[in-house]
Amino acid sequence: MTKTVAQAAAAALLLLFAHDGFAAGDADRGKALYAVCATCHGPQARGMQEMNAPALAGREEWYLIRQLQNFKSGIRGGNPKDTYGLQMAPMAQVLADQQAIEDVAAYLRSLGD
C-alpha cells in the first residue's frame, strides 16, 4: 500500500511540474483590476519604496497567485508584527474571486516580457 501511495504522489508531482507555469488568467482583464494595485506598486508594477511595495512585474504567476490567495484568506497579513502584510491584506479583498487573482497575475507576468 505504501508503494502505491508513493507512486501516486510522484505522479501528482510530475503533473504539477509538467505544467508550463502559467495560470489561466486574462492579462487584459488583469490590467483593469490592477489599477487599484498601482497606487502602491506603481503603474508598471516596478514597486514603490515609499509605500514599501515590492516590484511585481514579470514575477511568476504561481508565486503571485499563491501570495494573493494567502492575503485574501488571511494566511498572510493577520499578524500585528507584519506591518506590510497588514497593508496588503485588505487590498487583496478587492479581487472578487480566483479568476480575478489569475487575471492580475497574468497581467503582472506580461509586464516582464
Image (spheres, grey):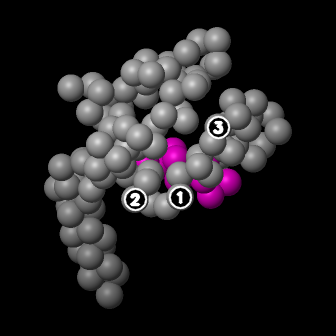
Q: Tag 1, which secondary structure?
A: loop
Q: Look at mark 1 in the image and give the residue it sits on.
A: 96
- Left/right of residue 60 with respect to residue 38 in the rendered view: left
| Depth check, front residue: 83 or 37 | 37
| Residue at the spot of label 3 | 88
The residue lying at 48 percent from left, 34 percent from top is 35
Q: Which residue is mark 2?
A: 99
Q: Magenta residues: mostly which secondary structure?
A: helix
Disc on res. 20: none
The amino acid sitting under disc 2 is: Gln
Q: Earlier in the sequence, mark 3 or mark 2?
A: 3
Identify the magenta region: 65-74
Residues at marks 3 and 2, CA–CA distance in whole angstroms: 19 Å
For the residue carrying disc 3, how many other residues have a C-alpha within 10 Å: few (<14), some (14-19), or many (20+)? some
Q: Marks 1 and 2: CB-CB under 8 Å?
A: yes
Q: Horizontal placement of 38 versus 25: left or right?
A: right
Point out the tag, 1 or 3, that comes first from the N-terminus.
3
How far separated are the C-alphas under marks 1 and 3? Answer: 15 Å
Amino acid type for the residue under numbered disc 1: Ala
| Nearer-the-camera pick, 28 or 88 | 28
